[in-house]
Amino acid sequence: MEANDDAHIGRHGNQRVVLELTLDVRPDNVSLRSLKHDGHDIDHRNYKTEISSTSYDQSKIPALSPPRSPGANSLQEQMRKEKRYYEAASPAREAVAPVLGKSKSRTGQALEGLRFISRTTEGRDPEELWREVETRFQRLADPSSCLLSRSDFAACIGMKESKEFAVELLDGLTRRRFGIDKVKWISKEDLAKYWAQISDRSFHARTQIFFDLCDKDSDGRIAEKEVKEVILLSASANKLSMMREQAEEYAALIMEELDRENKGYIELSQLEALFHEGFESNDSRSQTLNMHIGPSSSVHYYNWARPMCQLVEKFNFHFQSQWQRWWVLTLWLAIMFALFTWKFIQYKSHAAFQVMGYCVCTAKGAAETLKLNMALVLLPVCRNTITWFRSTFLGNVFPFDDSLNLHKLIAGAIVLGVIVHGGAHLACDFPRIANANPFLFYATLGQDFGYQQPSYGEIVSTSEVMTGIFMVFLMAIAYLLASRSSRRNILKLPWPMHRFTGFNAFWYSHHLFILVYALLIIHSIFLFLTHDWLQKTTWMYITVPIILYCGERTLRAIRATQFKVDVLNAAIYPGEVLALYMAKPFSFNYLSGMYIFLQCPNVSPFEWHPFTITSAPGDEFLSVHVRDCGDWTRDLIHMFSQASIKKGAAHTFIKRYPRLLIDGPYGAPAQDYKKYNVMLLVGLGIGATPFISILRDILNDWKIEEKERKNSDTFSASPSFNGSPLRITSPLFTGSPLFTGSPLLIGSPMLSNAPSPSSKKRSRNKKNVYFYWVTREQSSFEWFKEVMNEVAENDQKAIIEMHNHLTSVYEEGDARSALITMVQALHHAKSGMDIVSGTRVRTHFARPNWRKVFARLAARHPYETIGVFYCGPVRLTKELDSLSQKFTQKSKTKFIFHKENF
């Protein structure tokens, strides 16, 4: 869209300056087309004004103060000042103010985002940054000489974690300025000049610094050896071990691209061209698979007129998004309150009330809630039942994704009930019984105690009280060992106490609840004040849940003998990850996103561990990926790595894999992906496993759909002669089960062109998938390389966007990753492969900006419901959940968040 704007720009004394701007307004930016002053064109070709898309209204573009003359240089400077003013005035805004920068080539705009300081300086005021550098200089400099040591330069400029790179940067700067390198001491004046060059964001300054880094002998030329040294330096700073091994190959690639005349060196102008190629291709993202994410201005926001309306809208949104949790929680609390009140009132009219007062009412009310919760706590761990319920209409009513949290919540209520029940008895009821007036005791409680008033010690030693105390003791052990700090070995205990923490301690201690329930039954039989069997209601609460849970464990034992799987192949990937490929058992049906329990009797005959299925339901095999995160997984990986025995000169392998048992499959949040046409899949590290299965499943659907389409096209293109069927005996159909034993008749009902019902269903439910995989280690990309390459090759309709993010590499724009980015772009353009991941999917550096991700999806898919699926550590859960709620509330796109933490 083109817009002409006659704007009052400003005043200089009494002079009024009017500029006519012609702007190109696009969905993602606003750029300057022409500039006129008093009807005369101003040459603007060497300048570019660009306003990036933002999350607020594009019409709110700040007015610019006038230059002293209509000349371009003064206009450039004034707009730079205006940019700094608006950034300082509104630091919280996501908008990017107008930037006008000099650029003699397209490399200027391609490199405008490059930064030479660490990630912590992003969005900071340059003067404030210099003050911090100056403060560090005063702290680190030698007090007597006021000079900074060479070894402290990295810490002084904020690159303490990249000391080697910072020292090389210092040498490059001193070579340019003094013609020497390896200076030992730096004055404050020199530091200020170095910092000005480092923080200078102009194109020429950046390329000059990289040229200085490469040009070790200061001859104005860069040899292949010097290029290799800088690649090694950058790879080391970014922890890219695989790239260090291929530094010579990448240096040769750069020389091959730039040194076309085989001079043996390249010059600064050629380096500028390399920057241009690398960053322009990196930012443009020619393929949809690797689209760069920026802020979006197309997000539609609602505006509430009054605070009360806003509060009502927030409550309404929260209720709509959390209603499943709220109604279950409300019902549970209401039932507990009703049971407590019922027993409290009942015992208020009991004869024992005259002796024990409200203490007995409180204890009995808490006991009734304990009966309920001891029954309910078993239900969330009945995995087979929950998996079956997920596939029914109850899956839309109950929050089955929160079954584990519900289990923990009920356990917390049990702890509270035990404290109230046991505390009321031990601290109030029993002392009152022991010290009661004998006449009152015989009249009210004598029959319950055999007409003999007991002492406090005699009451505690009874079977009723002792079973209760043992139950509390066993429950306390299980509760403490199930805590997160104990279960994940966060709590480091000295030897030999460390054996009492970890997953094994959690797993085995939880089986103490078998004794707890046995003691609970005994405890409920021998009661002081209740003698009628029908009034002893504990068995009524727990019978059905116990039968259901025992049935689940029995089913697991049966399936363990039935689902004995044969391991087809096992692969050990970098990062201590074991990929197991097993033959799929007969009648083993599952959905993508589900998980199984795995047992290896050779490691432990009792331990079962959950792993997400990484194969698709349509695959002929069953696969899981196991990462070393404990003693059991470590032993399993070691056992399978030793199972391959090298034999013979032909390097053949005989596989003797350990026996495996599986139990499942069980439902998980990710299996609900089929409910959405648009999905955001986020995996951290090994948390990508459920989404690999989803990608495989979508890929298999593509293949089936493409096969059906080709068959349909083949049949529809066949000729017809006078309305008679055409007889074909071509060997094209040989071996097909449809045509065995009879010729093919084109036009017969059997070969109708109408697509199959499954094909119709697939065509109606087109998916858009955005997959983000964030990992710290470059070697992690080896885990699912084949799947990513297959998706990249077959995604002709641009349905899937895959984004790999490597957090060990400094973000795009940092000097320590700039050369990596250039080589990455050059190699990808030539071979179609990414040097970091080894796949066809380009790798981004640093963590994603999740706010921008959500803004772009909201702008791209208005009025859609987007399923946000996350699998990984807890630390990212809160941010993604918060963004889902925020963008659902403020945009016209609805985000539904699902999580699976480990």
Image: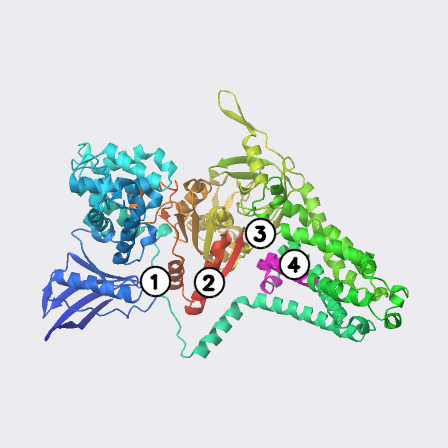
Given residues 787 and 894, the one toward you in this image is 894
- The amino acid type, in three-letter code, at marker 2 is Ser
- Are discs 3 and 1 less than 8 Å apart at CB? no
Q: Name which of mark 4 and mark 2 comes first in the sequence.
A: 4
Q: Is residue 70 left or right of residue 559?
A: left
Identity of the amino acid at label 1?
Answer: Ser
* Occupied quadrant, residue 294: bottom left
Measure the C-alpha gap from mark 3 to mark 1: 39 Å
Amino acid type shown at disc 3: Arg
- Earlier sequence position, callout 4 versus callout 3: 4
Tag 2 near tag 1, CB within 8 Å: no
Q: Residue furthest top?
A: 649
Q: Which mark is residue 882?
A: 2
Give the residue displayed 81% in from the left and 61% down from the top: 456
What's the CA distance linking mark 4 and mark 1?
A: 45 Å
Residue type at the position of mark 4:
Ala
Residue with the mark numbered 1: 296
Q: Nearer the viewer, residue 847 or 544?
A: 847
Find numbered disc 3 in the image and state the secondary structure of the residue it sits on.
helix
Give x and y (percent) for residue 489: 56, 46
Q: Position of residue 170 (x, y in %)?
A: 24, 42
Predominant secondary structure in magenta?
helix
Secondary element type, mark 4: helix
On the question of residue 162 being in view, the answer is: yes
Q: Which mark is residue 484?
A: 3
Range of residues picked out in magenta: 394-417
**Cβ atoms at labels 2 and 3 below 8 Å apart:** no
